[in-house]
Image: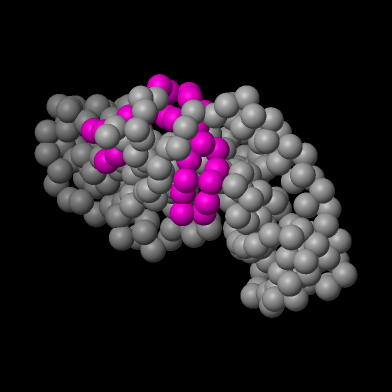
Amino acid sequence: MPAYVVRCGIMRILHVMQSRQTCTRGTCVIARTQRGVEAGEVLCAAEGSAVSELVDPPSGTILRTATEQDHSDLNQLRDMGDRDAEICQRVMADLQLPMDLVDVERMLGGERIVVYYLSESRVDFRELVKRLTQELDTRIEMRQIGVRDEAKLLADYGDCGKPVCCNTYLVQMPPVSMKMAKMQKATLDPGKISGRCGRLKCCLRYEFDTYEEYRKALPPIGAEIVTADGRGKVLNQEILARQLLVQMEDNRRILVRSDQVLSVIRRSGRAPTNESIAADEEDQD
């Protein structure tokens, strides 16, 4: 039985699903997941590197390719979602709960409605669930999310002009730290290195492993080195170019390629380590 990676729900959760039929990329299917019956998009066959990149993906079963009636039902659910959101907002306001509604999702099979909300503290929403169950006549599931998940649900385009990564292909939100921005010599202006969620941009993480690999191969700042032009002290690192700004004994400042370093006399500099970076990581969930 073939298996496929299928993206489902407004949170774009990736599943590995069994299927009795052959599917192609981009096919809209109706599947049964742990949440119930919902629509999904086939991304690829569940094999090789595609599956190795997923961490404990939920399972499911593809029931059929979506029909015209299914698409009609999905459009109707989207229209009902606007009404559901208005009802949720009204009941939250009536109960004066310290929470902000982000989105409402109806399962295609009608098993439940998932309410996504933001809150800075624990909320006793038992009365809210009771009233919503009565008004919407279905099971209610409350799900508290963070600001990064809110961006995943609502954000559109980033500063780069492309759709935000969390809204398109990112499976997991990577931890990002200020030291990653410093190592890449990005501006430290919060307004320029923050994403739509208000936290550090995920893309600061993308090239970090390469920067870290190149940095380890360079003498640290403050180290004394020997080159063909004589001895000098490392003032700065140009990590991607694999070059060093070196002050020679005659006070000249020159750029030296890493392969021009004959030896390191003293490694007095202290560059950031994996441990220090990990300690400084900013939890963005």
Residue at horizontal 70 percent and vertical 73 percent from the top:
125
Image spot of residue 56 (x, y percent): 33, 52
| Relative to 46, residue 145 above or below | below
Up/down of 58 relative to 233, above or below: below
The residue positioned 42% from the left and 23% from the top of the image is: 25
Tell me where residue 165 appears, x and y as whole percent.
Answer: 53, 36
Does residue 253 appear anywhere in the picture?
Answer: no
- Can residue 61 be seen here? The reply is yes
Is 263 or 272 nearer to us in this picture?
272
Name which quarter of the figure residue 22 lies in: top left
Residue 257 within the magenta-colored segment of the rendering: no
Left or right placement of residue 101 versus residue 39 in this view = right
Between residues 188 and 231, which one lies in front from this camera angle? Answer: 188
Quarter holding residue 99? bottom right
Quadrant location of the N terminus?
top left
Find the magenta span and give its range: 24-52
Q: Position of residue 153 (x, y in %)?
A: 63, 44
Q: Nearest the camera: 54 or 127? A: 127
Residue at 36% across / 59% down in the picture? Answer: 278
Q: Is residue 48 magenta?
A: yes
Q: Is residue 126 above or below residue 227?
A: below
Please give left or right for residue 178 compared with residue 81 in the image: left
Q: Which of 225 and 70 lies nearest the eye of the viewer?
A: 70
Residue 113 in percent (x, y) is at: 66, 55
The way the protein has been coloured in the rendering is one colour
Please give the name of the residue rendered at 82% of the width and 48% of the height, measured from the top-left corner. Answer: 83
Is 68 left, or right, of 15 in this rendering? right
Count every numbered label the image shows and give the total: 0
